[in-house]
């Protein structure tokens, strides 16, 4: 079992995330931002990994620091779960519809953090969250975890587009972190990530 727990405390936030990529989709999230809790829950549930996330942030300012720092802590937890990469599938992708919306995510969990984001929301807010923070969340997560991610979404309803992207990312992440084949092998021509 690759169970990790990561804590981060700053003057702006206090966050604890426990992650088990070998879980079954048991999720408990409390960030103080209900719509974001819904997105993280969908991501982990559909990705099939166990996750708990508790966060206290300076929500009296806005939700930016809380969501950004959750991305940082979740990225650190994923990086620890990957370890030296032995046995993981490494690459994965998912294409997920949600009504009129569609999201495509392709991942490489090979140690190089990068985000390509294609899609726009129609409104300045998704739920109560500024729409630009979602790209920043995934950027923070991917750069800390060492994941290259291409996230594309389209549709008409912002909630559906956002949820499809989180579900697709979760499914691709669960698949990429799965142990597959030779448990001692690192899927890299270099021999390490």
Image (cartoon, rainbow, N blue to C red):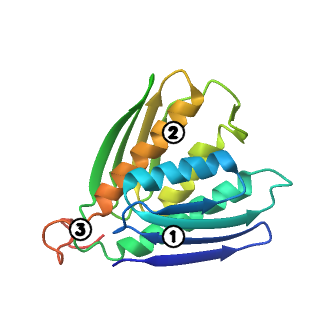
In the picture, measured across the screen, residue 102 lies left or right of residue 184, that is right
Give the residue drawn at x 34%, y 60%: 109
Q: Earlier in the sequence, mark 3 or mark 1?
A: 1
What percent of the width, then of the height, locates residue 4?
Answer: 46, 77
Residue corresponding to mark 3: 179
Q: Quadrant of the N terminus?
A: bottom left
Give the residue drawn at x 43%, y 35%: 152
- Few, some or many C-alpha atoms within 10 Å of disc 2 (few <14, some 14-19, many ≥20)? many
Residue corresponding to mark 1: 76
Residue corresponding to mark 2: 163
What percent of the width, then of the height, locates residue 56?
Answer: 74, 65
- Few, some or many C-alpha atoms within 10 Å of disc 3 (few <14, some 14-19, many ≥20)? some
Q: Nearer the viewer, mark 1 or mark 2?
A: 2
What percent of the width, then of the height, locates residue 34?
Answer: 68, 49
- SS for tag 1? helix
Above-or-below relation of 20 to 65: below
- Kindly tell me whether residue 61 is visible in this rendering: yes
Q: Are marks 2 and 3 in contact (CB under 8 Å)?
A: no
Residue sitting farthest toward the right? 60
């Amino acid at each position: 079992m690759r169970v990790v727990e990561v804590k981060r405390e700053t003057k702006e936030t206090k966050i604890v995330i426990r992650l088990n990529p070998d879980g079954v989709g048991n999720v408990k999230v409390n960030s103080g931002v209900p719509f974001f809790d819904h997105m993280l829950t969908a991501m982990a549930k559909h990705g099939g990994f166990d996750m708990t996330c508790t966060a206290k942030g300076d929500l009296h300012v806005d939700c930016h620091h809380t969501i950004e720092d959750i991305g940082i802590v979740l990225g650190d937890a994923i990086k620890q779960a990957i370890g030296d990469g032995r046995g993981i599938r490494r690459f994965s992708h998912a294409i997920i519809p949600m009504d009129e919306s569609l999201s495509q995510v392709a991942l490489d969990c090979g140690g190089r953090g990068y985000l390509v984001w294609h899609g726009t929301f129609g409104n300045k807010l998704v739920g109560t969250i500024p729409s630009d923070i979602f790209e920043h969340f995934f950027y923070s997560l991917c750069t800390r975890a060492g994941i290259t991610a291409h996230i594309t979404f389209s549709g008409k309803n912002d909630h559906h587009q956002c949820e499809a992207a989180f579900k697709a990312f979760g499914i691709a992440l669960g698949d990429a972190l799965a142990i597959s084949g030779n448990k001692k092998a690192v899927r890299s021509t270099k021999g390490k990530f």
